[in-house]
Each structure stands twice: as structure tokens, then as C-alpha cells.
Amino acid sequence: MTTGDGANPSGEGNMNWRLWQILPMTIGLVATTVAAKDIAPADIRVMTGDTIVAHGETYRLVGFDTPETVQAQCPSERKLGYRATFRLRRIVAEGGLDLEPVSCKESHACAILRVHGQNVAELMVAKGLARPFTCSTASCPPHKGWCAGATHG
């Protein structure tokens, strides 16, 4: 026997409907939780101020851009690039790290690295060792140069 709203008096239909309402939220929460993984400092090799290797995968850290070291356009860019790389190594050595792979427009994998819950991008920008750098879903803006009046793409 059913009631006028299509549910049976035992509440069975109502229970199934509630389950289907809650299930997508639960899956989303679990997927978000699984995406960011705790990672030990020993599992990360810092390549530059915004690029790391973790478990054999190279990741471009998103949300910021640091000066180049190998392909620097001037000595001041190279010097600031080495400072950014050194600072990222110190941040990684502190531990309390989470690595969250994200999709991006770069030629290799991208990720967000957090230390004690704070995005490393914010720390690097706050120290003056990086600039905010955000891509749209369609493309990334050109990189600004670090030498007087320079840009690089």
C-alpha cells in the first residue's frame, strides 16, 4: 500500500530518496579528502621555486610564478630564482605537507602544495619571491619577466 505521495507507509521510499540526496554530497566530500594527500618531506625533491618532483612525477605548483634559475634572462632573476628555490626547500623541510594534484594547461602535472594547511603560493608571494599566477580554463597568461622591462612566454 502506498500513500498519496508515492511513498509506502513504512517510510521505505522516503529513506531511499534521502539516501540519493545525501550520496552525491558524501562522494564529493570523500573525493575532496582523497585528492589532497599527506606527503613526507623526503618524498619531495625541489627543482625550482615553483616545481617539485614527488613520487617520480614532476609537478608545477599552481597559483604563483617564481624567477627562473637555469633560463634566467639576467643575473638578478637568477639570484632571486635561487632564493625562491632555497625558500621552497626550507618550507618542504618543515613537514606538515599536503599535495593536491590539479588539472592545468601546463605540459606536465600541476598541484597545490600546502604546509600546515596554508598554500605555499601565498607564502612565496608574501616573501616577495614569487608573483601570483593564475590560468583560466582556456589558457595561461604570458609569464612576466623578472628583469627590468622584460617579459617571457
Image (tube, helix red, strand yellow):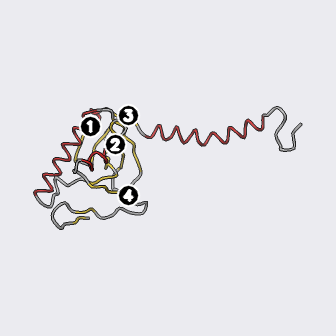
Q: CA distance from mark 2 to mark 4?
A: 17 Å
Of circles 2 and 4, which is in front? 2
Q: Which mark is residue 92?
A: 1
Q: Which mark is residue 113?
A: 2
Q: CA distance from mark 2 to mark 3?
A: 10 Å
Q: Earlier in the sequence, mark 2 or mark 4?
A: 4
Residue 14 against residue 111 in the figure, above or below = above
Q: Amino acid at mark 1?
A: Val
Q: Residue at x 38, y 63 (%)?
A: 139
Q: CA distance from mark 1 to mark 2?
A: 9 Å
Residue 4 place in picture, x, y as percent: 87, 44
Q: Amino acid at mark 2?
A: Leu
Q: Earlier in the sequence, mark 1 or mark 3?
A: 3
Q: Residues within 10 Å of mark 1 (few under 14, many from 20)?
A: many
- Check disc 4 and report the residue beneath it: 105
Residue 133 place in picture, x, y as percent: 32, 57
From the viewer's perspective, tell me whether residue 20 is left or right of residue 82.
Answer: right
- Check disc 3 and report the residue beneath it: 38
Q: Nearer the viewer, residue 53 or 147?
A: 147
Q: Earlier in the sequence, mark 2 or mark 3?
A: 3
Q: Residues within 10 Å of mark 4 (few under 14, many from 20)?
A: few
Q: Earlier in the sequence, mark 3 or mark 4?
A: 3
Q: Earlier in the sequence, mark 1 or mark 2?
A: 1
Of circles 1 and 4, which is in front? 1
Q: Amino acid at mark 3?
A: Asp
Q: Earlier in the sequence, mark 1 or mark 4?
A: 1
Q: Quadrant of the N terminus?
A: top right
Q: Residue at x 41, y 48 (%)?
A: 102
Q: CA distance from mark 1 to mark 3?
A: 12 Å
Residue 120 place in picture, x, y as percent: 31, 44
Q: Quadrant of residue 68?
A: bottom left
